[in-house]
Structures are given as C-alpha cells and as structure tokens.
Image (cartoon, helix red, strand yellow):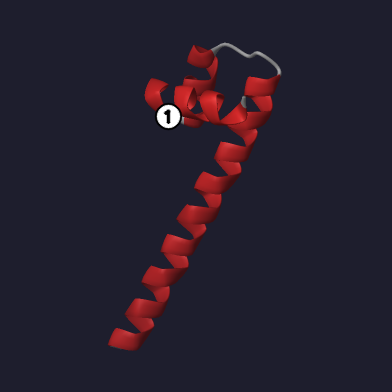
C-alpha cells in the first residue's frame, strides 16, 4: 500500500473512532438525564468516573 493509501486508511479509522466516541457521549448524556447510576454508565460506556462526572456537570 502506498503512503497515501496508508494515510487515507489511518484517517478513516480516526474518523470512525471519533464518531463512535461522540455517539457514546450522546448516549451517556441521555442516561444521565434519566438518573441512571454513574457506575452503570461507566460500565457500559467505558468512561472513567471523572469523564462521567464531567458530562454530568456539562448536562446541568
């Protein structure tokens, strides 16, 4: 594969990872609104407690 092809593939993967993180963040915000336990949100999303608490503050 050429360097250009490798760069293109790398950018596709990075874009997909970014979109996945955005979607998980959206879901976490929705369940925070429903007062789901932070521990459950951490388990499902893979976020740390600090990340969930930050989202919670952002959501208020």
Residue 15 picture location, percent across and down: 48, 63
> Mark 1 = which residue?
51
Work out whether residue 18 can be spotted.
yes
- Label 1 packing within 10 angstroms: few (<14), some (14-19), many (20+): few
- Image quarter where the C terminus lies is top right
Q: Residue at x 62, y 30 (%)?
A: 29
Please tell me whether residue 23 is drawn above or below residue 30 in the rendered image: below
Residue in front for this viewpoint, 59 or 51: 59
Please tell me whether residue 38 is drawn above or below residue 9 in the rendered image: above
Please tell me whether residue 27 is drawn above or below residue 6 in the rendered image: above
Q: Quadrant of residue 41?
A: top right
Q: Quadrant of residue 9?
A: bottom left
Q: Residue at x 42, y 62 (%)?
A: 14
Residue 46 picture location, percent across and down: 44, 30
- Image quarter where the N terminus lies is bottom left
**For residue 18, side relative to residue 27 (left or right):** left
Q: Residue at x 71, y 17 (%)?
A: 34
**For residue 23, side relative to residue 48 (left or right):** right
Q: Residue at x 53, y 25 (%)?
A: 57
**For residue 44, side relative to residue 27 (left or right):** left
Q: How many callouts does the rendering have? A: 1
């Amino acid at each position: 594969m050429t360097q250009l092809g490798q760069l293109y593939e790398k950018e596709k993967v990075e874009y997909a990872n970014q979109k996945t993180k955005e979607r998980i963040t959206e879901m976490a915000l929705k369940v925070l609104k429903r007062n789901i336990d932070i521990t459950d949100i951490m388990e499902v999303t893979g976020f740390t407690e600090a990340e969930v608490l930050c989202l919670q503050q952002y959501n208020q």
